[in-house]
Amino acid sequence: MILRILFACVTCCAAPFALADVWQTDQGSGKLTFSATQAGAKFTGGFESFQVRLDFDPSKPANGSLHVTVATPSIDTADADRDEILRSRDFFWAEQHPQAVFHAERIERDGSGWRALGQLTIRGVTKPASVRFALAPDFDKLSMKGTASLHRLAFGLGQGDWASTEWIGDEVDVNFELTLARSAIR
Amino acid sequence: MPARNTSERYGYVAQGLHWLIVGLLIVQVTLAKIAAGLPLGLDRLALLARHKSFGITILALAVIRLGWRLYDRPPPLPPMPRWQLVAARVNHAALYILLFAMPITGWIMSSASNYPVSWFGLVQLPDLAAPDRALKELLKLVHKSLSYGLFALVGLHLAGALKHQLVDRDGLLFRMLPWRPQ
């Protein structure tokens, strides 16, 4: 471990951290959570399974791309009843749409971080969306942290009675924090 | 009727709190019963959200009521055998404990199942526990068991009041009523 830290220090000092590369989610690392409002109270849930691929060169952000795939059946809100409803046809319809996808081929500066502008597809509905994120080198890896927000009803998340915003708010905030490793496949 | 208790009866503060809580308890039992019979869905969510808001209301009223009771002592009970005095005291104490325990166990249960509680959608209350399935199941059992305890105590309380009214005819019931028959 100490050797690894020394090595990382030496390589960091010797040459600026080379960010330009294709990065992928490190298996089993990271959190993708969302917070939504039910009956006037915010609660947090998450997805257990998702993948991120970031092709990024900070000197040429416009050429970068961000691709996120989320396994909708892996939704987890710490309540089996609610998870069942969220996986049902009334919400994610996970059987029919097992993946939610965000794909951006445009990345721009956003304050001290970045913003990826692309398309978000959930439940078969595609809408423009943007994801704000920050990157920080973590030895030979890259830690990525970011947020997005969306309106659930724009994607049909909430059919029938659930389309009412009286008990369940329309706005959903998404947060993620993960570690990316250099991808073997370019 | 004065705000404070007299030696004859409760004042309107104590009476108001008593009857308001009685009314809310009836609402609570009704909401819980209806919700238990509903399938998972928006109606159930809405009813349970109201149940939680009323529960928090009862908790707040219980705090006020206990404070008021300590500040303004209840009128003395009519003469009765000692065991009845003790029974009445124990029953009252247990009812007070449940007025706190019911909403608090419900609140912890809601927190443990990752349904943070809001008061009528106006204020979000802090979570009393982190999401935890086992804790939720335990609290669900405790909350339900306590509700049966509450029914039993209310039954005894009511039976005692009626016995004094109809058998002893000592007018005890009027201590908690705004009027008195001429």
Image (cartoon, helix red, strand yellow):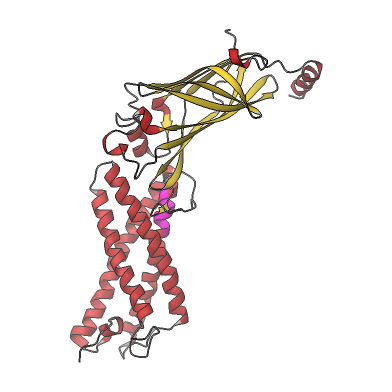
Which quadrant would residue B177 be assigned to in this image? bottom left
- Residue range highlighted in magenta: B104-110
Q: In the image as oriented, which residue stretches furthest toward the top?
A: A186
Asked if the magenta segment contains residue B107, the reply would be yes
Residue at point 70% right, 22% down?
A139
Q: Which residue is drawn at the image coordinates 41% and 64% (left, top)?
A: B59
Q: Is A52 one of the magenta-colored residues?
A: no
Tell me what residue is drawn at x 40 percent, y 68 percent.
Answer: B61
Q: Quadrant of residue B92?
A: bottom left
Seen in the picture, residue B17 relative to B139 is either above or below; the reply is: below
Give residue B82's position: percent from left, percent from top: 34, 86
Q: Please name whichever residue, B154 or A77, is drawn nearer the observer in this view of the structure.
A: A77
Tally of numbered discs: 0
Which image quadrant is residue B52 in? bottom left
Question: Where in the figure is residue B159, as x and y percent of width and height?
Answer: 23, 76
| The C terminus of chain A sits in image quarter | top right
* Residue found at x 31% / y 40%: A164
Q: Is residue A184 above or below residue A33?
A: above
Q: Is residue B165 something that shows in the picture?
A: yes
**A107, B10: nearer the viewer:** A107
Q: Main secondary structure of the magenta part?
A: helix
The image quadrant where one finds the N terminus of chain A is top right
Q: Return the residue found at the far left.
A: B166
Is residue B91 among what the camera can see? Answer: no
Q: Nearer the viewer, residue A44 or B160?
A: A44
Q: Position of residue B156 (x, y in %)?
A: 27, 73
- Foreground of the two, A19 or A179: A19
* Percent position of residue A133, x then y: 59, 27
Establish if A86 lies above or below A5.
below
